[in-house]
Amino acid sequence: MPYKAITGTFLDEITVDIPSQNWGEREWAREFDTFVEAGIDTVVLIRLGLGERLACPSKAVSDRLATLPVYTDLVRLFLDLAAERDIAFYLGLYDSHYHWYRYDWKTEVDLNLAVIDEMWERYGASPALRGWYLPHETTDSSLRILDINTTLAARLREVSDLPVLVSPFFHGRADMAMSVDPRQRPRSPEEHVRIWEEIFQRYSGLVDYCAFQDGTVELARSAEYFAATAEMATRYGITSWANIETFDRDMPIRFPPTDWRKLAHKLDAVQPYVDKVISFEFSHFLSPNSVWPAARNLYDRYTEFVSTRTGR
């Protein structure tokens, strides 16, 4: 089986905890050229908006919430750059970062139902638009995530035949477990399967791809979690991808590019279990164009490593 290098990346422009690189159209065009050189054929805008910030104009959001001005329509920019290079673009929906955290899932859904119609009417004709991303990430079925994601995925199925991607996170590290609930502990692969059996059953026929975030399990146990997930997802018609984190969670600052040896191990660990490897997130942490000098070095080490696995 051919070695799976990173062939997809999130675009993290409306972010929670990653600083902006302040790129304009020229820098993004250079980055999309780099995607082609690096073998990336899929990009995923992680969300079209977060709270008051938007990546594109959205009357559906602005009519309901106070929003900041939009100076550049990044969705249009990314679609045009992707179309010119035959890169598949997945559009992430809107995350209020508020309603669903307060268990007000219906407001979150109603807002996004309007967003879906608005985005499809505006961007649906682009040849680069080839999928959707549901940005409400959780580790289990808490915060009414099943109601949110199944309702939105069903609506996406109605407006288009494009695939739907999710990227949840494992509950497999002590620090991640405590961040969700101080009373909790990491879940074993067996506990993970028990919880996600219900979720995948509900997602069946609605969600096409599931790319778990690999950085939320202990590094040495990554393969165990992906093996358990892949077997279960296949039973419900969901294709397993891996979301390989190219940043480091174990440093005292948030977040530097990871050590290349960690990245090599993470790639090796998921090979038998996934159909595709995407990353969070190439442009900040792995790109030779990144503002992080360490990212440029990581790219060199990554390409050297992949060449030893692929023979190219």
Image (cartoon, grey):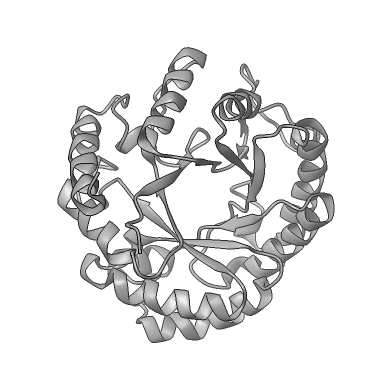
Eyeballing the image, is 96 above or below 66? Answer: below
The x and y percentages for residue 50 are 59, 40
> Of residues 109 and 277, which is closer to you in this image?
277
Q: In the rendered image, is residue 93 in sight?
A: no
The x and y percentages for residue 288 are 28, 27
> Of residues 4 and 195, which is closer to you in this image?
4
Figure quadrant of the C terminus? top left
The x and y percentages for residue 215 are 32, 59
Task: Name the residue: 34% across, 63% down.
Answer: 216
Residue at the limit of the structure toward the front, as seen here: 311
Q: Is residue 264 left or right of residue 156?
A: left
Figure quadrant of the N terminus? bottom left
Task: Name the residue: 56% across, 82% down.
Answer: 197
Residue at the limit of the structure toward the top, as seen here: 26
Task: Name the residue: 53% across, 58% down.
Answer: 137
Q: Is residue 29 left or right of residue 82?
A: left
Figure disc tally: 0
Task: Name the residue: 30% across, 37% down.
Answer: 286
> Of residues 176 and 189, which is closer to you in this image?
189
Q: In the rendered image, is residue 272 in sight?
A: yes
The x and y percentages for residue 111 are 77, 47
